[in-house]
Amino acid sequence: MASSALICDTEQWKDLKAHVDDIKKTHLRELMSDPERCKSMMVEFDGILLDYSRQCATLQTMNKLFKLAEAACLKEKINKMFNGERINSTENRSVLHVALRAPRDAVINSDGKNVVPDVWNVLDKIRDFSERVRSGSWVGATGKALTNVIAIGIGGSFLGPLFVHTALQTDPEAIECARGRQLRFLANVDPIDVARNITGLNPETTLVVVVSKTFTTAETMLNARTLREWISSALGPEAVSKHMVAVSTNLTLVEKFGIDPKNAFAFWDWVGGRYSVCSAVGVFPLSLQYGFSVVEKFLKGASSIDQHFYSAPFDQNIPVLLGLLSVWNVSFLGYPARAILPYSQALEKLAPHIQQVSMESNGKGVSIDGVALPYEAGEIDFGEPGTNGQHSFYQLIHQGRVIPCDFIGIVKSQQPVYLKGEVVSNHDELMSNFFAQPDALAYGKTPQQLQSENVSQHLIPHKTFSGNRPSLSLLLPSLSAYNVGQLLAFYEHRIAVEGFIWGINSFDQWGVELGKSLASQVRKQLHASRQKGQPVEGFNFSTTTMLNRYLQESSD
Ligand code: F6P
């Protein structure tokens, strides 16, 4: 396929379009009755089992999807990513988050330079600094150990680290390593978030880490100035150097802000914000909390999936299979959303993180060459841990709209509980739901079944479940730091696969700019109007009315 051609013009895309009718005629009940098909739709790698037999797809569908991958030059695109080519063409950058978790002796080039030694220089610096803080050899201005950390950052400089922190918080090994320490995240510019973060903390024992790739993000910089004031008003301005450190690609701005660049941890423009959790963005705050050795296991888990993604044949390649199935659901079956349903409370921040990785990456309207797409790209991602979600939005998934679901289950709980006298353990109870839901969605319940159960006639339509609702299941052996790294990399690569097939640039995010520049115009006007005590003008009728109401009532 020529680089500027659209994937929807290929024979392979058209062939899949033609195949949709056959699939829509076949109920999942029927597909699930073929054990050979189900067997070949289970793939295992490094302890993780993927079961995609409950997708509305046959083996023929899969073959057609593999042909589509070929037509989209998927293998070549993956290779280009790993080889450091500048595949983020609108920003003229390579996309090398895989280098962040590569082993020390790996060679990954960007512009002819092996970046792995630079990565490890920063990792070694993080190990050293975090150990000094944790052991109490780096202390605050009044000589007290810094046991609390507030990480300031937003978007990719927040969601990934929060996801990993939440996942590790109840891991027995991580608990041991985090004893006596606290890690908090300040993201929102809402003063309520500042108040929540500093409540109960003493500046004397708090280290603030400002995390920003650009060091220009308005919300992060205002929060950073706010906490700088919190520290200096309590301990004097000279305390800032002991209590504030940074993670950024822009060390010049870090220094201008008043943070010693010696206490800053670098990363590089080949790391996209939403793909930066394995850089100092995540590794530094997490190492302060859990120690570097725990975080290194997380990096190793991600690296294992990187190798798998790079080298496994497509029919055994979990991220490729996940990505192709998503394209099938969105572009062919017409299901634009995806529910992420981990049956683990420790994964409660997985969906918020994947929302950014997926929707900021693939929410695009033009191809990588700037041609308007005649098909929708991207997915609407949302989710909640099971079973909480079951008591919230599953009604719609069972009897309303069709939303393909990712069920994620864990074999060994981080916190097993066996109550005396109960039939099953708490974890077995949770997992019973994990196993039941995919079949409920796939099989549904027919009016005939309801009749045989003597359900009243008038209730039969209400109690009927059409079924034929696709899902896939991932079973992880446990939720160690290593497994969390694996899970992260599955999603990161799946999303890249989707973007590679759709022919878009999954690594830029121009869509967030317009709102930012309009906010800056509003900010200027608000400031001027407050100073002069005059109403704002120059916006449309609706915005002007709302702004003036706000101005008037907030200055009362
Ligand atoms: O919201 C847009 C965005 O640029 C994200 O892509 C990024 O993760 C976030 O802002 C934060 O940016 P920075 O790390 O530069 O502060």
Image (spheres, rainbow, N blue to C red):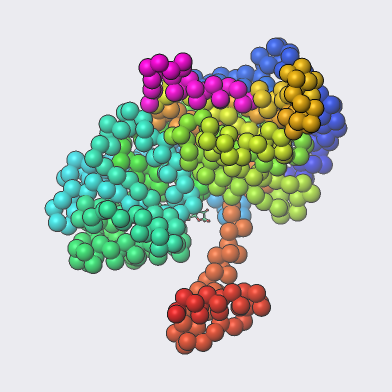
Q: Quadrant of residue 74?
A: top right
Residue 301: image location, x then y, percent:
44, 29
Q: Is residue 515 above or below residue 151?
A: below
Q: Is residue 438 above or below residue 287?
A: above
Residue 187: image location, x then y, percent:
43, 55
Q: Is residue 101 left or right of residue 37?
A: left
Q: Is residue 332 left or right of residue 187?
A: right
Front-most of residues 384 and 297 = 384
The residue located at (63%, 36%) in the rendering is 394
Q: Is residue 443 magenta?
A: no
Front-most of residues 315 and 416 = 416
Residue 119 visible at all: no
The residue located at (44%, 80%) in the rendering is 556
Residue 177 visible at all: yes
Q: Quadrant of residue 279?
A: top left
Residue 338: image location, x then y, percent:
64, 38
Q: Which residues are magenta?
A: 415-438
Q: Is residue 420 magenta?
A: yes
